[in-house]
């Protein structure tokens, strides 16, 4: 019981942390306040105020896979930067299409996936808040 | 939303397989991350932003995605391309010989005024060199195109090569715009222009597609 309680409060704390993080990186209109960089190298992905914060559940494979064996390990992420034109990106790489999805990567060091794009929606490109660096 | 760039250039990488085209896909970073997931599915294209003469230029760079193995590079792939990087591997004689075939392929399928540049890649592998720099230069002169030796692995000349190609495309565009007399003083580049009758159709098609 006690364990359950503590896990619950941990969860709430994480939520609180995440929402304060989101407040720090977005302006009142939900646009990115700062530049958005690759987490691993100095590559600029998006310039300030070019993307809008959205909540959308999507499963992204981990950037660091333990081994090449299937199944692919990953995590369902919720907070994404949304961009409606691919040319809004300063630098980004697109993977080939798998099940109608193109995964986004850093254009320089190729770490990824840092986001995704569905070939069925030409006006939506998503970059995971947790997979890029802000500021 | 207002456009955040002045020019958009579609560039292609052409050459035999295994000459390192994928590495040249504008990788500036020396320590590329070997993501098992990404490398398994492969890279389709990249968007890069560079600045030339105070203008923001978006480059959309495409790899042949292995089609070269079957020699099925067709008009569809070349459509809208404004610049082509012809890549061979300095440690592989055959890939150099095939540059002539690739040039013929381009002449057959690509727009007549596409800018070309030739790259001798893997120039860090000096002890395995099969094609001298001289021969590369000669071939480039023969076809009237620019030439550089590069190493994607050691980050030699890769960035310079793309800047050079982009600069050549931009100069060509600016000359066209000037000669058609539609824009004096050159504001904003080709994208704001609407009635460019003198422009090649294929070029503008690419703009509307993207």
Image: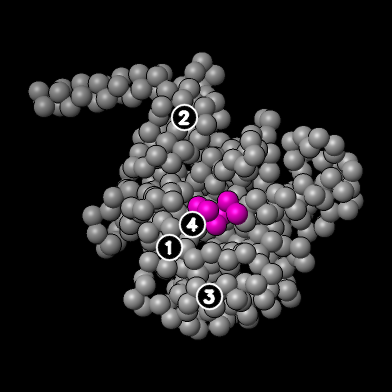
- Residue for badge 3: B134
Above or below residue B139? Residue A27 is above
Above or below residue A96? Residue B88 is below
How far apart, in angstroms, are the residues tagged by discs 4 and 1? 7 Å
CA neighbours of label 3 inside 10 A, class few (<14), some (14 to 19), many (20+): few
Element class at badge 3: helix
1 vs 2, front mark: 1
- Residue for badge 4: B158
How far apart, in angstroms, are the residues tagged by discs 3 and 4? 19 Å
The reply to whether residue B48 is visible in this rendering is: yes
The disc, 3 or 1, on the residue closer to the chain's N-terminal end is 3
Please state which of residues B137 and B88 is positioned toward the viewer in this rendering: B137
Same chain, marks 3 and 1? Answer: yes
How far apart, in angstroms, are the residues tagged by discs 3 and 1? 17 Å
Task: Please give the name of the residue rendered at 42% of the width and 36% of the height, measured from the top-left corner.
Answer: A37
Chain identifier of the residue bearing label 2 in the image = A
Q: What color scheme is it?
A: one colour
- A106 relative to B160 in the view: left or right: left
Task: Please give the name of the residue rendered at 85% of the width and 42% of the height, measured from the top-left corner.
Answer: B194
| Numbered circle sitting on residue A35 | 2
| Numbered circle sitting on residue B75 | none
| Numbered circle sitting on residue B151 | 1
Magenta-drawn segment: B158-164
Chain identifier of the residue bearing label 4 in the image = B
Task: Please give the name of the residue rendered at 33% of the width and 48% of the height, measured from the top-left corner.
Answer: A63
Please state which of residues A28 and B66 is positioned toward the viewer in this rendering: B66
Same chain, marks 2 and 4? Answer: no
CA neighbours of label 1 inside 10 A, class few (<14), some (14 to 19), many (20+): many
Q: Are marks 4 and 1 in contact (CB under 8 Å)?
A: yes
């Amino acid at each position: 019981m006690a364990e359950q309680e503590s896990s619950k409060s941990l969860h709430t704390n994480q939520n609180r942390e995440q929402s304060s993080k989101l407040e720090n990186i977005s302006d009142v209109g939900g646009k990115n306040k700062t530049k958005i960089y690759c987490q691993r190298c100095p590559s600029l992905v998006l310039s300030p105020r070019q993307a809008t914060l959205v909540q959308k559940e999507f499963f992204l494979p981990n950037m660091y896979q333990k081994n090449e064996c299937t199944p692919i390990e990953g995590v369902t992420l919720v907070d994404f930067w949304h961009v409606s034109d691919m040319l809004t990106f300063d630098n980004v790489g697109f993977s080939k299409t798998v099940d109608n999805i193109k995964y986004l990567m850093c254009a320089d060091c190729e770490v990824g996936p840092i986001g995704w794009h569905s070939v069925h929606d030409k006006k939506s490109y998503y970059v995971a808040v947790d997979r890029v660096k802000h500021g | 939303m207002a456009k955040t760039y002045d020019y958009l250039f579609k560039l292609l990488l052409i050459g035999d397989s295994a000459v390192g085209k994928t590495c040249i896909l504008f990788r500036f970073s020396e320590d590329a991350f070997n993501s098992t997931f990404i490398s398994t599915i492969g890279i389709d294209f990249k968007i890069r932003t560079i600045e030339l003469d105070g203008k923001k230029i978006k480059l959309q760079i495409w790899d042949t995605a292995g089609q070269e193995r079957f020699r099925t590079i067709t008009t569809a792939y070349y459509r809208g391309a404004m610049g082509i990087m012809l890549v061979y591997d300095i440690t592989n004689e055959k890939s150099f010989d095939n540059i002539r075939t690739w040039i013929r392929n381009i002449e057959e399928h690509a727009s007549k005024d596409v800018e070309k540049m030739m790259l001798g890649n893997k120039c860090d592998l000096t002890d395995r060199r099969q094609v001298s720099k001289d021969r590369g230069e000669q071939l480039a002169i023969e076809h009237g195109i620019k030439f550089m030796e590069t190493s994607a692995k050691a980050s030699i000349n890769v960035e310079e090569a793309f800047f050079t190609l982009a600069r050549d495309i931009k100069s060509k565009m600016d000359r066209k715009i000037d000669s058609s007399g539609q824009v004096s003083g050159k504001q904003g580049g080709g994208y704001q222009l609407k009635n460019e009758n003198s422009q090649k159709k294929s070029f503008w098609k690419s703009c509307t597609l993207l």
